[in-house]
Image (cartoon, rainbow, N blue to C red):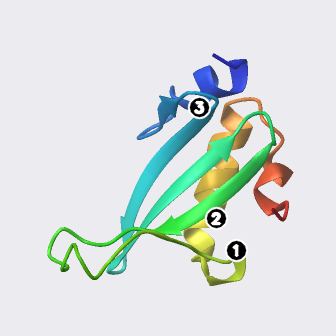
């Protein structure tokens, strides 16, 4: 496991998934999955259907960075920084 992944899973809500770490965020009626990929040093945001949604009609979908709420982006940068990862990684385009 990458050191950066091991350090991220020490932050609240993060879990390791191979060469990536993931955290889920619920806020303001929106649900997001946030993934950090150690090899690529990139962060991806996904919308996540709610448990109440029709599972056949709703699937996870990537979200452009500019559509992600600022408080969530700040939290991700803070978590990255606390894990010893350059927080500017959050701003990198895929």
Pointer 3 or 2: first along the chain? 3
Name the front one of labels 3 and 1. 1
Residue at 70% x, 53% y is 43
Pointer 1 or 2: first along the chain? 1
- Toward the viewer: 92 or 87? 92
Pointer 3 or 1: first along the chain? 3
Determine whether 52 is above or below 15 in the image: below
The span from disc 3 to disc 1 (Cα, nearest Å) is 20 Å
Residue at 51% x, 26% y is 10
Residue at 56% x, 37% y is 21
The span from disc 1 to disc 2 (Cα, nearest Å) is 8 Å
Determine whether 39 is above or below 35 in the image: above
- Toward the viewer: 62 or 77? 62
Callout 2 crowding tier (Cα within 10 Å): few <14, some 14–19, many ≥20: some
Q: Can you name the residue that lies furthest to the front here?
A: 56
**Where residue 73 is drawn, which disc sits there?**
2
Residue 80, percent from left and from top: 69, 41
Residue 60, percent from left and from top: 43, 68
Name the front one of labels 1 and 2. 1
* Circles 3 and 1: CB atoms closer than 8 Å: no
Quadrant in the picture for the C terminus: bottom right
**Where residue 65 is drawn, which disc sits there?**
1
Task: Kindly state the secondary structure of the residue where label 3 is placed.
Answer: helix
Callout 3 crowding tier (Cα within 10 Å): few <14, some 14–19, many ≥20: many
Residue 26, percent from left and from top: 35, 66
* Circles 1 and 2: CB atoms closer than 8 Å: yes
Q: Can you name the residue that lies furthest to the left here?
A: 52
To which quarter of the image does residue 13 belong?
top left
Residue 35, percent from left and from top: 58, 49
* Mark 3 lies on residue: 8
């Amino acid at each position: 496991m990458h050191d950066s992944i091991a350090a991220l899973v020490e932050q609240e809500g993060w879990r390791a998934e191979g060469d990536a770490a993931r955290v889920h965020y619920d806020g303001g009626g929106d649900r997001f999955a946030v993934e950090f990929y150690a090899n690529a040093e990139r962060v991806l945001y996904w919308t996540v259907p709610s448990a109440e949604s029709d599972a056949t009609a709703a699937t996870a979908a990537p979200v452009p960075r500019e559509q992600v709420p600022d408080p969530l982006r700040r939290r991700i940068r803070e978590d990255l920084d606390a894990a010893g990862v350059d927080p500017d990684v959050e701003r990198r385009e895929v």
